[in-house]
C-alpha cells in the first residue's frame, strides 16, 4: 500500500504552483491548500475546467459503480501504477467528495455514476468557491513555457512573459486531445528537454478511418449501428469483445463501442499497418438458425426484403453487408450467415489526436517516484492525463484524474515537509 506523509503543521511560508486547471490540477490544489500552504493555479485558458465542462455537457459521467476488480481492470497495463491511487481515492470516495460539495449522485442502469443534476457546471462552481475560500489563487491566460536557465517557471501572458519560483510544482496539463480547450501537449518539449522520459502522445477513445465507397458514405454517414457485438485481437493476439453501438461517419466509424476497443485497434494499426474489426450484426442469433432462415425460399421477394423478413437485418446493417461482401456471397446462405455473425471491417488509421476524447502516452511512470514526483526534477510532480495511461469512457478517465491529482498534491506536501526537516 502506498503511504503518504500527513502534515500536522501548516507551512504558510511555502508556495506551490499548480499548472493546469482541470480536475487533476484542481484536486492537487485542494489537497495542498487544506494544509495551509499557498497555492497558485495557472492555466492557459480564460477559465479553468473547460474540458471538464464540455465532457459533462450531455451528462457528467463522474465515475462507475462496478466491482473493485472490474473497475481497476479498465486501466490495462498501467493498473499496477494506478491501483494504489484508486485505492486511496476511488469511486466511493469520489462520490463522497462530490456530496461534500452539495452534489448528490446516482447510479445509472449501465453502472455509470452521474450527478443528480447531470451537469458539470454546478459541481465546478461549488468546487471553485471552496478552493477560493481556502486561499487558492487563480491566474488565467498563463501559458507555461517551461523553465529558464536559472530554474524559474516561464509563462506567456497577455502582458508579456512572466517568471516565478515556487517551492513545489504540480504539472497537470492534460494530454493532446481537444487542444482548443487547453490540452495541446505543448508541455512535452519542456520535459523532454530536461531528460524526462515521455511516451509519444497517441489518440485514445477515438474514431477510425475506413475506405468507404462513395455510395455507402453518401447513404449512411451519420447512421447509428445498434445492438451489435464488436471484437478484435490486440497485438498479443488476445481477442476483446464488446457489445453496444457505434456511428458510421463519412470517414469511418466512431462511438462508444469503437472507443472501448480503440487501444487494441490503434496499436494493431501501428504494429501491423491495419486492423480488422469484426461485427456480429445479430447477437441474439446462433449461426445455424441464421443459415436455416436464409436458406428458405424467397419467392418473388427481393434479397433485401428476404434478409429483413428472415433475420431483421435492414438499413445500415444491410448496407454494411453490401459494402463488405462480394455479390456472390449473398447467394450462399452459409457465407451470408457467417458474415452477419462476423463481418470484417478493415480500419485504415485512427482519427487525429485532436478529435480524440482522450490520449495515451505521456510522462512514464518509471520516471516518477511513489509520490508522482519526477525523479530528475525534485519538487516537480505530475498528475492526470499527462501521465502515460489510458482508460475507456464510462467514468474511468475522470476518476483516475481526480485520484492522481490528489496523490500528486499530497506528494507535494510530503516534499515540503522534507524541506522543513
Image (cartoon, rainbow, N blue to C red):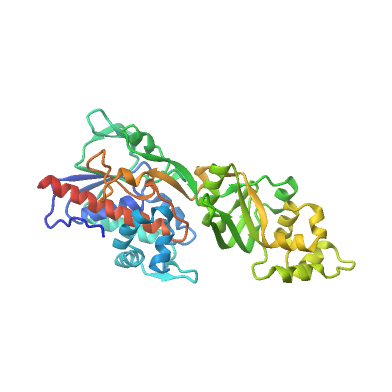
x, y percent for residue 7: 15, 56
Hey, which residue is sitting farthest right in the picture?
300
At x 67%, y 66%, the residue is 282
Is residue 296 placed above or below 24 in the rendered structure?
Answer: below
x, y percent for residue 32: 22, 53
Q: Is residue 174 left or right of residue 341?
A: left
x, y percent for residue 27: 30, 54
Is residue 173 placed above or below 299 in the rendered structure?
Answer: above
**In the rendered image, which quarter contains the N terminus?**
bottom left
x, y percent for residue 375: 26, 41
Q: Nearer the viewer, residue 294 or 40?
A: 294
Image quarter of residue 342: bottom right
Query: Can you see residue 20?
Result: no
Q: Nearer the viewer, residue 9 or 286?
A: 286
At x 59%, y 58%, the residue is 231
Q: Is residue 308 left or right of residue 410?
A: right
Amino acid at each position: 500500500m502506498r503511504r503518504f506523509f500527513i502534515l500536522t503543521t501548516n507551512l504558510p511560508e511555502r508556495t506551490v504552483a499548480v499548472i493546469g486547471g482541470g480536475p487533476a490540477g484542481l484536486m492537487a490544489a485542494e489537497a495542498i491548500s487544506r494544509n495551509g500552504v499557498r497555492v497558485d493555479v495557472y492555466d492557459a485558458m480564460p477559465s479553468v475546467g473547460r474540458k471538464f465542462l464540455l465532457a459533462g455537457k450531455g451528462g457528467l459521467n463522474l465515475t462507475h459503480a462496478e466491482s473493485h476488480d472490474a473497475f481497476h481492470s479498465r486501466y490495462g497495463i498501467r493498473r499496477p501504477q494506478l491501483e494504489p491511487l484508486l485505492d486511496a481515492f476511488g469511486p466511493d470516495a469520489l462520490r463522497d467528495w462530490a456530496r461534500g460539495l452539495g452534489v448528490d449522485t446516482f447510479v445509472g442502469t449501465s453502472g455509470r455514476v452521474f450527478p443528480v443534476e447531470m451537469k458539470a457546471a454546478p459541481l465546478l462552481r461549488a468546487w471553485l468557491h471552496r478552493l477560493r475560500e481556502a486561499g487558492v489563487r487563480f491566474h488565467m491566460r498563463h501559458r507555461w513555457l517551461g523553465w529558464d536557465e536559472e530554474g524559474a517557471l516561464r509563462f506567456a501572458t497577455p502582458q508579456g512573459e512572466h517568471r516565478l519560483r515556487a517551492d513545489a510544482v504540480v504539472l497537470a496539463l492534460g494530454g493532446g486531445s481537444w487542444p482548443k480547450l487547453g490540452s495541446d501537449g505543448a508541455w512535452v518539449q519542456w520535459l523532454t528537454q530536461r531528460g524526462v522520459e515521455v511516451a509519444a502522445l497517441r489518440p485514445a477513445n477515438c474514431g477510425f478511418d475506413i475506405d468507404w465507397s462513395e455510395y455507402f458514405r453518401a447513404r449512411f454517414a451519420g447512421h447509428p449501428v445498434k445492438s451489435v457485438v464488436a471484437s478484435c485481437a490486440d497485438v498479443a493476439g488476445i481477442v476483446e469483445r464488446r457489445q453496444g453501438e457505434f456511428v458510421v461517419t463519412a470517414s469511418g466509424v466512431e462511438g462508444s463501442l469503437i472507443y472501448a476497443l480503440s487501444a487494441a485497434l490503434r496499436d494493431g494499426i501501428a504494429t501491423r499497418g491495419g486492423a480488422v474489426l469484426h461485427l456480429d450484426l445479430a447477437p441474439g442469433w446462433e449461426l445455424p438458425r441464421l443459415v436455416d432462415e436464409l436458406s428458405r425460399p424467397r419467392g418473388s421477394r427481393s434479397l433485401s426484403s428476404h434478409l429483413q423478413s428472415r433475420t431483421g437485418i435492414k438499413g445500415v446493417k444491410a448496407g454494411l453487408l453490401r459494402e463488405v461482401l462480394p455479390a456472390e456471397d449473398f447467394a450462399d446462405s452459409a457465407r451470408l450467415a457467417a458474415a452477419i455473425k462476423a463481418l470484417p471491417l478493415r480500419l485504415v488509421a485512427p482519427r487525429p489526436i485532436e478529435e480524440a476524447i482522450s490520449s495515451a502516452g505521456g510522462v512514464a511512470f518509471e520516471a516518477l517516484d511513489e509520490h508522482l514526483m519526477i525523479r530528475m526534477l525534485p519538487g516537480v510532480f505530475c498528475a492526470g492525463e499527462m501521465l502515460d495511461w489510458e482508460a475507456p469512457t464510462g467514468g474511468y478517465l475522470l476518476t483516475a484524474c481526480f485520484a492522481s491529482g490528489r496523490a500528486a498534491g499530497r506528494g507535494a506536501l510530503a516534499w515540503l515537509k522534507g524541506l522543513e526537516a
